[in-house]
Structure formats: C-alpha cells, structure tokens
Image (cartoon, rainbow, N blue to C red):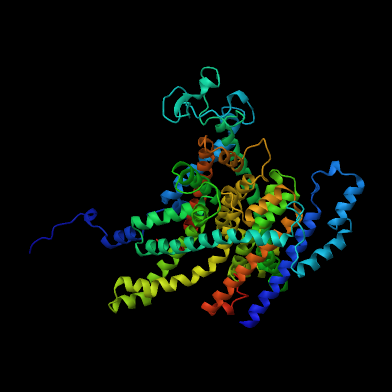
Amino acid sequence: MEQIPQIPKEKFKLVHDENNAEQEKISTPSLTYMQDVRRRLFKNKVAVVCLTLLSIIVLISIFAPVIAPHDPNAQQVTLSNLPPKLGNLNIPGMNGYQNMGGKMVDAYKQAGAPKGTSFILGTDYLGRDLLSRIIYGTRLSLVVAVLATLVDLLIGVPYGIVSGWKGGKTDTFMQRIVEIVSSIPNLIVVILMMIVLKPGLTSIVIAIAITGWVTMARLVRAQTFQLKEQEYILAARTLGEPSMKIATKHLIPNLSSTIIIQTMFTIPNAIFFEAFLSFIGIGIPAPNASLGTLLSDGQKAFRFLPYQMWAPAIILSIIMIATNLLGDGLRDAFDPQSSDH
Amino acid sequence: MTKYILKRILYLFLTLFIIASLTFFLMKMLPGTPFSNQNRMSADQLKIVKAQYGLDQSVGVQYVRYMVGLLHGNLGTSFQFNNEPVTALIGQRLAPSMQIGAQAMIVGTVFGILLGAVAAIRKNTWVDTLATFISILGLSIPSFVLAVLLQFYLAYKWKIYPVALWDNFQSSILPTLALSALPLGTVARFMRTEMVDVMSSDYIELAKSKGNSSWRVVAKHALRNSLIPVVTIIGPMAVSVMTGSMVVENIFSIPGIGEQFVKSITTNDYPTIMGLTIFYSFLLIIVYLIVDILYGLIDPRIRLGNGGKE
C-alpha cells in the first residue's frame, strides 16, 4: 500500500471563504449625500470651468482695492477716452493707437500723457481707468446679487415652509397673495420701487427682493408638502417636537437642494435687473460704476470708442453664462434623475 | 371649464384693481414735483395748474376719481407730452412695440423648436452640444447687451441695417433679433428636454417598429407631442420680451411703449407711468390667462389640478 504523503497544513487554503470576502468587500468608501453631490459636480467639466471662472471673478471683486490699478472714480480729464494700452507691448488694439481720420495715431502722445502711462482697458470720457471701473462695477453687481438673494432666502424660505406646513386655510390665503404678487410683472414693480425710493444700492436690493421671493416660496411650499408626509416627520411629530424645531432640523436640510438650485438662478436674475436698471438710468447713481452703467456709457460712445462697450459686455455675459451653467450643473448633481444624459 | 375661466377673469379684475391702487399710492409717495419750472410760477399760478390736473383735492378724492376714470377707460392726462390723454399716447405707440414683440416671439419660438428638436434627435453628438451652447447663450446674454453688439456690427460697421430708425420692415430686423434670443434659448432648451422624453417612450418605439421612416416618426409623433408643454412657457416668455423691449426700443430709437415708459420715468410724468404700468400688467395678465385656457383646452388633465397653477 502506498503511503499517502503527508501534506503540510499550511498548504491548505480555504478557497470559498476568501473569495466571498473578496466579493463582499466594499472597495469604495461610503459617501454621504453631500459628498456624492460634490463628486457628481466635479465630474461635470462645464460646471467646474464655470465654478473656477466665477471664483476668480468673485476673488477679484473681493480684493478690488488691492487689484484695481487706479481709483475708479478719479478723473483726469486730460487723459479722457484713451484706447487700451498694455505696457509697451505692441499688440494691435492694445498699443494705445487710435484711428483718427484714417490714420493710426498714438493717442497717449497726443493727450500729452506722461511717459509710461498705460491703461490696460483704456479710459472713459472723464479719464477714469476703465479696468478699475470694471473691477469695482463687477463688485457692485455681485454685492447687489448676493444681497438680493439673501433677502429672497429670508422671505421666500420661511414663507414657503409656513404655507406648506400649515396647509388648509392659511395655505390658501398665503397662496392667493403669492398669486397676486406673481401676476404683477416683476420689472414694473422693480421700476416703480426704484422711482419711489432714492436710487442706490439699498433700493435696488429692496426692489429686486420684493418680487423675487415668490418663486422660492412656491418651490419650497411644494417641497414641504411632500416632505410633510414622510415617516421621519411623522416620527418627530409623534415624539412631540415643536414645529419650529422640525422646520430647522428636518425640513430645511431636506429642502437644501431645492434652495441651493433656486439661488443659483436668482443670482443671474438679480445681476440682470441691476444692469437693466442702471442701463436705463435709474439704478446705481453716478459716479459709482456698475456693469449696467458702464455698458450704458459704452453704448453712447460705441461708434468711435468701441472698446468702452466691449469690456463690460463681455464680463456681464460671462457672469450670466457661468451662473446659469453652474446652476444646471448643481441641479444635475443634486438630482441625477433630472439629467437626461 | 367655464367656471374655471370665470374664476380666472374675476381674479384678473381683482389683480388689476390691486395694481392700480398700488401704483396710485406709490406715485403719491413720490418725492419731487412734475412741474419742472415750479420756481418760476407764482403761488396763484401753481394753484391754477394744480387745479387743472385735479391735484388740489385730497388724496382720497383723487383716488376715487382715478378709479372711476379707469373704469371708463380713462388713464388721465400726461403732464409732459403736450397734455395728451395717456390712452392716446399709448395708442399711438402700441403698433411698433407689438410688431417687434410679435416678430421676436415668432422667430424665437420657431427657431427654438427647430433647435431643440434637432438637439434631441441628435442627442449626445456635437450637434446637440452646439445647440445647447446656442440656447445657453440666448438665455444668458441680456437682450440689451445683444442689442448693443448687433447695432455696432450689423448696423454701424457693416451697414447692413439702419443704426436707429423706424420706418420700414428693414429697421425692425435688428430689434427683433436682439429680442428673439431669449425666447429662442428658452424654447430650445424646453423642447430638447421634452423631446428626449418623448423619443424614448413606447409609442415612438411602436411607430418605429411598424416601419415608419425616422423622419415620419419625428414629424408625426415626436414633434407634436413635445410641442404641447411648450405652450406653458409662452406666458413667461412674453413677459421677458416685454421687459427687453423697454430698453431695446431705447437703443434703436423705436417709438414704442417701452421707450415711452423709460422716458416718462426720467421726466417724472406720473400719469403716464401709472397708465403704462396698468396697461403692461393688463397685457401680461391677459397673456397668462389665454395661455392657461389654451393649455386647459389642449390637455384636459390640467383642469383637474388646483386652479391651473403650479
């Protein structure tokens, strides 16, 4: 009889068990909802580009006093309407030359500007540095947008929550108000408010906020209606949580995606209204610059000095496009089902 | 349906009443005076002028008067523009605004539908990307920025269209283009989403499996069913076109109501501001009403909802 060779114990391996463990292992870390949202947002290239662009613009406006090369309101009438000039670089369109009667003339020399003066985006009709004005103008437009959005949130969110939470007669009454406010054209109310109030930052914010909260209130109400029926809300109620606590602890966190997305669409809206009001001359009063006033000034002189119109038009368009696209990206990130890709 | 329409009309009057009252009292709160050469008038003269416009009575009396006048279709008399009745002023200036507005809506909607449909059919290709990009541009760039750029290139530089003139169809092209960008973007985007949904539905599969050509499927089934929801966004679009036309009319010097409105604001002409505010609101509410009724007729499910809103 043949001897069965002794097989060392360590040569035995539990095949199944290890395979199972391998299969069952969770290889990716578990993500919270917010982490998942962030991951989806950063996967979206367009949204990332917009986010970067907007961050740069916001940073520049925050640090405007450091970055702006000149005082935006300092007038030097002798140096008025100078074309863009970037140092001593000889780039067509950026070399300080201007077409005068068919000939290219060095406008800086003609105005008797001291050697070495250069305005990257040129100067306006009062000799104010256009680049500095645009930086400060963007800052002002963004301030209006942020403030108007904040007021929107402060009115719209509580209004929507109360209306949705209470339901019944309160809701009907509150919704009638919303219906009436929303049937009055936004712009008309804004313009009327601007006529009554003194022109300026506060008035613009108030005027925009007066009509702006309606959409937010509507969305929040509809969402609250749905959330109200959820089990965890029922549990909280059964445990005797006061309504106020339910609203802040359970409703608002679950409403956050709706609120954030709507905010991203309120911001370009506010920027548009500010630019619009300033463009027709009832917005930000002189001498302060906003994108709207700069554009309006540029439009008046566009035949001979088109550079004065280009810069504010481009910046305004970039901000509008970037916020809209970022809003889209956020919506897709918060609610993957909404995207149809 | 009749009950619903009646209810809506009732709301229409209620809203108009509130708007009219609101504008009236807001205008009374205004600082300053509409009489620009007040300093040169003696106290007696001022009294006479004020009496002429009925400004010597108490606010309450003025309010009742204004409201009664409103019921009779009388919006008061302009302080600035040759003492003309506001209604006459609006009447003269309505046609150009309506023309540009209608043209912009038609151009924007038609091309928006085409753009959206093409994007949906060629989903996730470069055609789709391009179409989406165009619609984002249309949505984002304010109409007045576009108007200024169009004026500079097409009118001033290349001299294809007049810079700022109002006489024939030629002169209405630039303002129409500037205003149609927003409806175009909105419709294209909406249309794409709708159509992508429709294209993946069962009845499209069925139509395809029955051997219909893809062109026929799109034209007969997909396009038609995607178009219905587009009706809902006509209302908000009309609002934005009207908003845009205020400043676009100014840029192109078009004698429309938008230009008049801006002019009245800068000259403190209260009766005209009030009249135009009420008129604009009236127009908008009517547009919303028509759109809601239309939608109710097209899609019966909406009638069962809560008041056609939301």
Residue A31 visible in the displayed image: no
Image spot of residue A115 (x, y percent): 52, 17
- Quadrant including the N terminus of chain B: bottom right
Q: Is residue A39 above or below residue B187?
A: above
Instruction: Answer left or right for B61 relative to B30.
Output: right
Question: Which quadrant of the structure image shows residue B8?
Answer: bottom right
The one of B78 and A91 positioned closer to us in this rendering: B78
Identify whether B214 is placed above or below A322. below
Check the image and report above or below for B101 versus B222.
above
Residue A105 horizontal/vertical position (percent): 47, 24
Residue with the most extreme right position: B44
Please name the residue shown 54% across and 63% down the image. Answer: B102
Q: Residue furthest left?
A: A1
Residue A321 position, x and y percent, is 49, 49
Please give the name of the residue rendered at 67% of the width and 75% of the height, measured from the top-left corner.
B9
Q: Is residue B283 visible?
A: yes
Give how far across and how far down residue B48 sits, in percent.
89, 52
Q: Residue furthest top?
A: A115
Q: In the image, what residue occupies the spot 50% across and 57% down?
A: B169
Q: A34 or A142: nearer the eye?
A: A142
